[in-house]
Image (tube, rainbow, N blue to C red):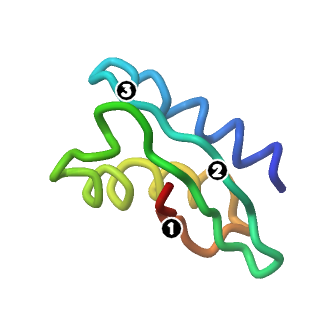
Amino acid sequence: MREKVEAALAKVRPMLQADGGDVELVEVTPNGIVKVRLTGRCKGCPMSQATLKNGIERIVLKEVPQAKAVEQVAE
């Protein structure tokens, strides 16, 4: 499943990089929780939660039906 999540993140990465940010896959838990770390300008952005839920999570859940949710982890 990790490979499928990486492929889904690759689809949203250009949008994030255009604004000076990025997303890094930290882990995929056995129960389907995808843990990511936002980097660059995304890390401290006030809109990061909206980006996470409306952008990243939406694409990951669409591309990887086994995934249950996407959560942000701190440094």
Q: Which residue is mark 1?
A: 71
Q: Residue at x 70, y 48 (%)?
A: 5
Tell me the residue that label 3 is attached to.
15
Mark earlier in primary sequence (1, 3): 3
Quick one: label 1, few (<14), some, or many (20+) residues within 10 Å? Answer: some
Frontmost residue, 56 versus 45: 45
- Residue situated in front as seen by the camera: 35 or 53: 35
Residue at 45%, 49% in the rendered image: 56
Neighbourhood count class around disc 3 (C-alpha, 10 Å): few under 14, some 14–19, many 20 upward: few
Q: Is residue 7 above or below residue 20?
A: below
| Label 2, label 3: how far apart the Cα atoms are | 17 Å
State the separation of the CA atoms marked 2 and 1.
16 Å
Q: Nearer the viewer, mark 2 or mark 1?
A: 1
Residue 2 at x, y = what percent?
Answer: 81, 51
> Which residue appears farthest toward the top when viewing the image?
18
Task: Report the mark closest to the observer, 1 or 3.
Answer: 1
Distance from label 1 to label 3 (Cα)? 19 Å
SS type, badge 2: helix
Looking at the rendered structure, the kind of residue marked 1 is Glu
Q: How many marks?
A: 3
Of the two numbered discs 2 and 3 on the same chain, state the one appearing first in sequence: 3
First-in-chain label (2 vs 1):
2
Please give the label number shown on residue 29.
none
Q: What is the x, y in percent for residue 14?
A: 45, 21
The amino acid type of the residue labelled 2 equals Glu
> Which residue is identified by label 2?
63
